[in-house]
Amino acid sequence: MKNDFKNVENTRISISELMLPSHANFSGKIHGGYILNLMDQIAFACASKHSGAYCVTASVDTVDFLNPIEVGELVTLKASINYTGKTSMVVGIRVESQNIQTGTINHCNSSYFTMVARDEHGKGVIVPGIIVSNQIEMRRFLKAVKRIEMKKNRQDEFDSDEFIPHNYIKDLENYNVKIEL
Protein backbone atom coordinates (compact mmCIF):
# COMPACT_ATOMS: atom_id res chain seq x y z
CA MET A 1 0.00 0.00 0.00
CA LYS A 2 1.32 3.41 -0.98
CA ASN A 3 1.70 5.91 1.85
CA ASP A 4 3.22 8.71 -0.19
CA PHE A 5 1.85 12.22 -0.43
CA LYS A 6 2.23 14.94 -3.03
CA ASN A 7 1.81 18.70 -2.70
CA VAL A 8 -1.32 20.12 -4.31
CA GLU A 9 0.94 22.55 -6.15
CA ASN A 10 2.56 19.60 -7.96
CA THR A 11 -0.84 18.41 -9.25
CA ARG A 12 -1.69 21.67 -11.04
CA ILE A 13 -1.92 21.68 -14.82
CA SER A 14 -3.46 23.99 -17.38
CA ILE A 15 -4.33 23.91 -21.06
CA SER A 16 -5.30 26.70 -23.42
CA GLU A 17 -7.08 26.48 -26.73
CA LEU A 18 -8.31 28.99 -29.28
CA MET A 19 -12.05 28.63 -29.87
CA LEU A 20 -12.83 28.04 -33.55
CA PRO A 21 -16.09 28.39 -35.51
CA SER A 22 -16.28 24.57 -35.64
CA HIS A 23 -16.70 24.58 -31.82
CA ALA A 24 -19.79 26.84 -31.97
CA ASN A 25 -23.42 25.86 -31.41
CA PHE A 26 -26.42 27.18 -33.38
CA SER A 27 -26.44 30.46 -31.45
CA GLY A 28 -22.81 31.19 -32.36
CA LYS A 29 -21.42 30.55 -28.86
CA ILE A 30 -19.00 27.75 -28.03
CA HIS A 31 -20.90 24.52 -27.48
CA GLY A 32 -21.06 23.44 -23.82
CA GLY A 33 -20.43 19.84 -24.84
CA TYR A 34 -17.12 20.84 -26.38
CA ILE A 35 -16.07 22.54 -23.13
CA LEU A 36 -17.14 19.45 -21.14
CA ASN A 37 -14.94 17.34 -23.41
CA LEU A 38 -11.96 19.61 -22.68
CA MET A 39 -12.77 19.45 -18.95
CA ASP A 40 -12.80 15.65 -19.05
CA GLN A 41 -9.43 15.65 -20.81
CA ILE A 42 -7.79 17.90 -18.23
CA ALA A 43 -9.36 15.93 -15.36
CA PHE A 44 -7.87 12.75 -16.82
CA ALA A 45 -4.47 14.38 -17.27
CA CYS A 46 -4.44 15.85 -13.75
CA ALA A 47 -5.56 12.62 -12.06
CA SER A 48 -3.18 10.47 -14.10
CA LYS A 49 -0.28 12.82 -13.35
CA HIS A 50 -1.02 12.62 -9.62
CA SER A 51 -1.69 8.89 -9.42
CA GLY A 52 0.74 7.62 -12.04
CA ALA A 53 -2.06 5.38 -13.29
CA TYR A 54 -4.77 5.26 -15.93
CA CYS A 55 -7.85 7.08 -14.60
CA VAL A 56 -11.53 6.97 -15.46
CA THR A 57 -14.26 9.53 -14.81
CA ALA A 58 -16.58 8.29 -12.05
CA SER A 59 -18.78 11.38 -11.71
CA VAL A 60 -19.05 15.07 -12.49
CA ASP A 61 -20.39 17.43 -9.88
CA THR A 62 -21.81 20.88 -10.52
CA VAL A 63 -21.19 22.26 -13.98
CA ASP A 64 -22.76 25.72 -14.06
CA PHE A 65 -22.11 27.67 -17.24
CA LEU A 66 -21.65 31.21 -15.91
CA ASN A 67 -20.60 33.13 -19.02
CA PRO A 68 -20.76 32.26 -22.72
CA ILE A 69 -17.57 31.69 -24.67
CA GLU A 70 -17.20 33.40 -28.03
CA VAL A 71 -15.55 32.17 -31.21
CA GLY A 72 -12.02 33.61 -31.33
CA GLU A 73 -11.51 33.65 -27.57
CA LEU A 74 -8.71 31.82 -25.83
CA VAL A 75 -10.04 29.30 -23.31
CA THR A 76 -7.82 28.23 -20.43
CA LEU A 77 -8.64 25.31 -18.16
CA LYS A 78 -6.85 25.01 -14.83
CA ALA A 79 -6.98 21.84 -12.76
CA SER A 80 -5.61 20.48 -9.50
CA ILE A 81 -6.35 17.66 -7.12
CA ASN A 82 -8.70 18.90 -4.38
CA TYR A 83 -9.24 15.60 -2.55
CA THR A 84 -7.80 12.11 -2.47
CA GLY A 85 -9.51 8.98 -1.24
CA LYS A 86 -8.21 5.45 -1.42
CA THR A 87 -8.44 5.01 -5.21
CA SER A 88 -10.31 8.18 -6.12
CA MET A 89 -9.45 11.82 -6.55
CA VAL A 90 -11.56 14.94 -6.93
CA VAL A 91 -10.14 17.22 -9.60
CA GLY A 92 -11.17 20.85 -9.34
CA ILE A 93 -11.38 22.58 -12.71
CA ARG A 94 -11.73 26.28 -13.52
CA VAL A 95 -12.52 27.43 -17.05
CA GLU A 96 -11.75 30.99 -18.17
CA SER A 97 -12.14 32.68 -21.52
CA GLN A 98 -10.04 35.60 -22.69
CA ASN A 99 -10.92 38.08 -25.39
CA ILE A 100 -7.61 38.28 -27.23
CA GLN A 101 -8.15 41.88 -28.45
CA THR A 102 -9.25 43.44 -25.14
CA GLY A 103 -7.55 41.06 -22.69
CA THR A 104 -10.82 40.71 -20.75
CA ILE A 105 -10.97 37.44 -18.82
CA ASN A 106 -14.28 35.81 -17.83
CA HIS A 107 -14.79 32.93 -15.41
CA CYS A 108 -16.94 30.55 -17.45
CA ASN A 109 -17.39 27.67 -15.03
CA SER A 110 -15.90 25.57 -12.29
CA SER A 111 -16.52 21.90 -11.78
CA TYR A 112 -15.42 18.86 -9.82
CA PHE A 113 -14.61 15.58 -11.56
CA THR A 114 -14.23 12.44 -9.47
CA MET A 115 -11.61 10.28 -11.11
CA VAL A 116 -10.67 6.72 -10.16
CA ALA A 117 -7.23 5.19 -10.75
CA ARG A 118 -7.24 1.76 -12.42
CA ASP A 119 -4.64 -0.86 -13.23
CA GLU A 120 -4.39 -2.79 -16.51
CA HIS A 121 -7.10 -5.22 -15.27
CA GLY A 122 -9.55 -2.48 -14.32
CA LYS A 123 -8.93 -2.87 -10.58
CA GLY A 124 -8.62 0.16 -8.32
CA VAL A 125 -5.12 1.47 -7.63
CA ILE A 126 -4.19 3.16 -4.35
CA VAL A 127 -3.43 6.83 -5.04
CA PRO A 128 -0.99 9.09 -3.20
CA GLY A 129 -2.54 11.48 -0.70
CA ILE A 130 -2.19 15.22 -1.00
CA ILE A 131 -0.44 17.69 1.23
CA VAL A 132 -2.53 20.81 1.83
CA SER A 133 -0.34 23.78 2.63
CA ASN A 134 -2.71 26.77 2.81
CA GLN A 135 -6.27 27.71 3.72
CA ILE A 136 -7.53 27.59 0.13
CA GLU A 137 -6.29 24.02 -0.35
CA MET A 138 -7.76 23.00 3.02
CA ARG A 139 -11.11 24.60 2.13
CA ARG A 140 -11.17 22.77 -1.22
CA PHE A 141 -10.41 19.44 0.48
CA LEU A 142 -13.13 20.00 3.10
CA LYS A 143 -15.68 21.10 0.48
CA ALA A 144 -15.00 17.84 -1.39
CA VAL A 145 -15.52 15.87 1.83
CA LYS A 146 -18.84 17.67 2.42
CA ARG A 147 -20.00 17.08 -1.18
CA ILE A 148 -19.21 13.36 -0.80
CA GLU A 149 -21.10 13.19 2.53
CA MET A 150 -24.11 15.09 1.13
CA LYS A 151 -24.27 12.81 -1.91
CA LYS A 152 -24.18 9.71 0.30
CA ASN A 153 -26.87 11.12 2.62
CA ARG A 154 -29.08 12.01 -0.35
CA GLN A 155 -28.67 8.49 -1.78
CA ASP A 156 -29.39 6.92 1.60
CA GLU A 157 -32.53 9.02 2.03
CA PHE A 158 -34.09 8.67 -1.42
CA ASP A 159 -32.83 5.26 -2.56
CA SER A 160 -33.86 3.52 0.65
CA ASP A 161 -36.59 0.88 0.75
CA GLU A 162 -38.11 2.97 3.57
CA PHE A 163 -38.72 5.97 1.26
CA ILE A 164 -42.33 7.10 1.65
CA PRO A 165 -43.36 9.66 -1.01
CA HIS A 166 -46.29 11.01 1.01
CA ASN A 167 -43.83 12.24 3.67
CA TYR A 168 -42.43 14.72 1.12
CA ILE A 169 -45.61 16.18 -0.42
CA LYS A 170 -45.53 19.24 1.87
CA ASP A 171 -41.89 19.86 0.84
CA LEU A 172 -43.00 20.23 -2.79
CA GLU A 173 -45.79 22.78 -2.30
CA ASN A 174 -43.76 25.78 -3.52
CA TYR A 175 -42.40 24.07 -6.63
CA ASN A 176 -43.69 23.88 -10.19
CA VAL A 177 -44.97 20.33 -9.83
CA LYS A 178 -48.35 18.64 -9.69
CA ILE A 179 -48.50 15.49 -7.55
CA GLU A 180 -50.91 12.78 -8.73
CA LEU A 181 -50.06 9.70 -6.65
Image (cartoon, rainbow, N blue to C red):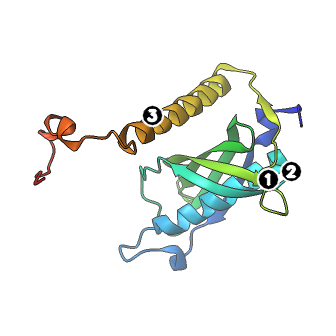
Which image quarter holds the N terminus?
top right
Kind of residue at badge 3: Asn
The residue drawn where x is 52% and y is 29% is 146
Q: Describe the element under mark 2 as helix, strand or loop.
A: loop
Q: Label 1: how many residues lie within 10 Å, few (<14), some (14-19) or many (20+)?
A: many
1 or 3: tag closer to the N-terminus: 1
Q: Are marks 3 and 2 in contact (CB under 8 Å)?
A: no
Rendered location of residue 160, percent (x, y): 39, 42
Q: Amino acid at mark 1?
A: Ser
Count of marks overlaid on the render: 3
From mark 1 to mark 3, how far is it between C-alphas?
29 Å
Residue of label 2: 52
* Residue 91 marker: none
Q: Is residue 84 above or below residue 106?
A: above
Q: Is residue 117 shown left or right of residue 111?
A: right
Residue ID at (21%, 37%): 168
Marks 3 and 2, how far apart at CA: 31 Å
**Label 2: how many residues lie within 10 Å, few (<14), some (14-19) or many (20+)?**
some
Which residue is labeled 1 in the image? 48
Q: Label 2 sits on what residue type?
A: Gly
Q: Mark 1 against mark 3, which lies toward the viewer? A: 3
| Quarter of the figure with residue 20 | bottom right
Alpha-carbon distance for marks 1 and 2?
5 Å
Question: What secondary structure is found at the residue carrying circle 3?
Answer: helix
Residue at position x 89%, y 32% from top? 4
Q: Are marks 1 and 3 in contact (CB under 8 Å)?
A: no
The location of residue 24, given as percent across then percent down, is 47, 74
Q: Which residue is mark 3?
A: 153
- The spot of residue 145 in percent (x, y) is 58, 30
Query: In the shown orientation, is residue 158 left or right of residue 164?
Result: right
Q: In which quarter of the view is residue 90 placed?
A: top right
